[in-house]
Amino acid sequence: MQTSRLIEELAPAGTSGSPSRETVPLRFAQIEMAVATDMADLKSDWHRLQAIKLNSLHQGFDWCEAWVKSHGRTLAVVVGRIGGRAVFILPLDIVLEKSIRIARLPGNHYNNLNTGLFDPALEVASAAELKPFLHMLRTALSPYADLVVLDCVPLSWRGSRHPLSALATTENQNHSFQLPLFPNFETTLAQLNAKTRRKKFRSQSRKIEAAGGYDHVIALDADEKHALLDTFFRQKAARLKMFGLPDVFHASEIREFFHRLIDAPTDGTDTSLTLHAIRMRGEHEGHVVAIAGVSRKGDHVICQFSSIDDSICPEASPGELLFWLMIEKSCREGAALFDFGVGDQPYKRSWCSQETVLHDILIAITPKGSVLKPLMVLATRAKAAVKHNPRLYALLQKLRAAKTNKAA
């Protein structure tokens, strides 16, 4: 049974006798729910739940705090307790869209994986068993929101079912892509076409060495972190402009959000955001040709963003080279999964052996939310239909580029 396996993982090795409070199966029917608006009041519960392997780092305290402070808003944090113990936390950012209050997870479209924070002893519930939960949620959130949107939720993640999977409303238009890692990098490569990969890496290395060589930079100093992040914003803006696409990092509050993330404290190998780069030597000394921002929680590494500058040595594919180096380093440091995040791109498919289907959970809180919910579902399904049709998607990208260029 799913719950039994989770309980075994949670229980300390070698324990016997009666199960402790932490290992007793917990049911949604036992939950008492409340909404908090001060994150600090929940910090100890938050840190306990975010440490659980299956819970996404995007709902971690530092990630949510950086979003709140950069946007100047207060979260509505839904907390479920059983016997006084917090068994789930759902942080929600409330934004007014066309007079309707939409509650989303902090980070919004900049998140690559959303789970909420759930105690692993909480049993996966059926739709019928979740009816009292939904009633409590509507009662608790009605002063704050009309519609709750939990997007990019994997119903099955690393062998476990999401506790709210029965509430899945529609498949998200995007999938995410992962590469399982092994301590031996050669074993990791063996999942792919290892011979071709190694040949490509040697070719890239020769070409970039012929142009003066390079350093694999990992920003550690605070000034270096912020300077490299600003370089990424410039590099990404130029790259998107080249393709006639809008700059999704343009807004000052989004840039501040990522600047706050790189200042968040690290915990061993765990980090909210670390910047890697390929920096040229020789004739092009100091020129950064590729940048990537990665996060790590436990054995899970997520690439949050990346960019390239192909004005120098484009034939060396510096972006591909950087991924090789980051994945190799992740293997050495004991990571088990390298996540390329949401969005279907050829370079992701070339690296990844695992594709994760994501779903959206939409919960109407008020009559206004009930009206908007089916419209949002239709919009998501329309986006999915377009993305799964290469010709139609290419046409849409051309129209989008034309609109962006006209606006510029």
Image (spheres, rainbow, N blue to C red):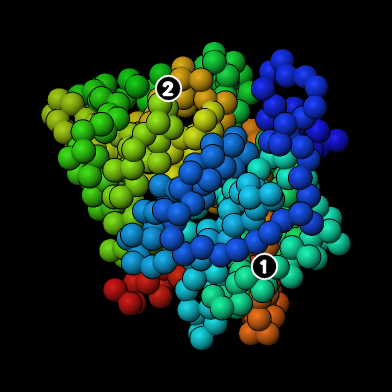
Question: Which corner quadrant of the image does residue 126 belong to?
Answer: bottom right
Residue 28 position, x and y percent, is: 76, 54
Q: Nearer the viewer, residue 148 or 226?
A: 148
**Number of numbered discs overlaid on the protein picture:** 2
Q: Nearer the viewer, residue 290 or 95?
A: 95
Disc 1 marks a residue whose amino acid type is Leu
- 2 horizontally vs 232: left or right: right
Disc 2 marks a residue whose amino acid type is Lys
Q: Residues within 10 Å of mark 1 (few under 14, many from 20)?
A: many
- 342 horizontally vs 375: left or right: left
For image coordinates 24% across by 39% down, the residue present is 225
Q: Which of 62 and 383 is in front in this view?
A: 62
For image coordinates 22% across by 30% down, the residue present is 280
Instruction: Estimate the spatial distance between the alpha carbons at disc 2 and disc 1, rounded to whole Å.
Output: 43 Å
Q: Is residue 393 visible?
A: no
Q: Is residue 321 above or below residue 362?
A: above
Q: In this view, does 321 lie above or below 261?
A: above
Residue 324 position, x and y percent, is: 44, 27
For image coordinates 29% across by 57% down, the residue present is 256
Q: In this view, does 336 lie above or below 118?
A: above
Q: Is residue 128 above or below residue 54?
A: below
Q: Can residue 30 be seen in this view?
A: yes
Residue behind mark 2:
329
- 135 horizontally vs 255: left or right: right
- 376 horizontally vs 241: left or right: right
For image coordinates 51% across by 46% down, the residue present is 46
Q: Which of 311 and 171 is in front in this view?
A: 171
Residue 362 position, x and y percent, is: 67, 67
Question: Which corner quadrant of the image does residue 220 belong to?
Answer: top left
Q: What element carries label 1?
A: helix
Residue behind mark 1:
137
Q: Residues within 10 Å of mark 2 (few under 14, many from 20)?
A: some
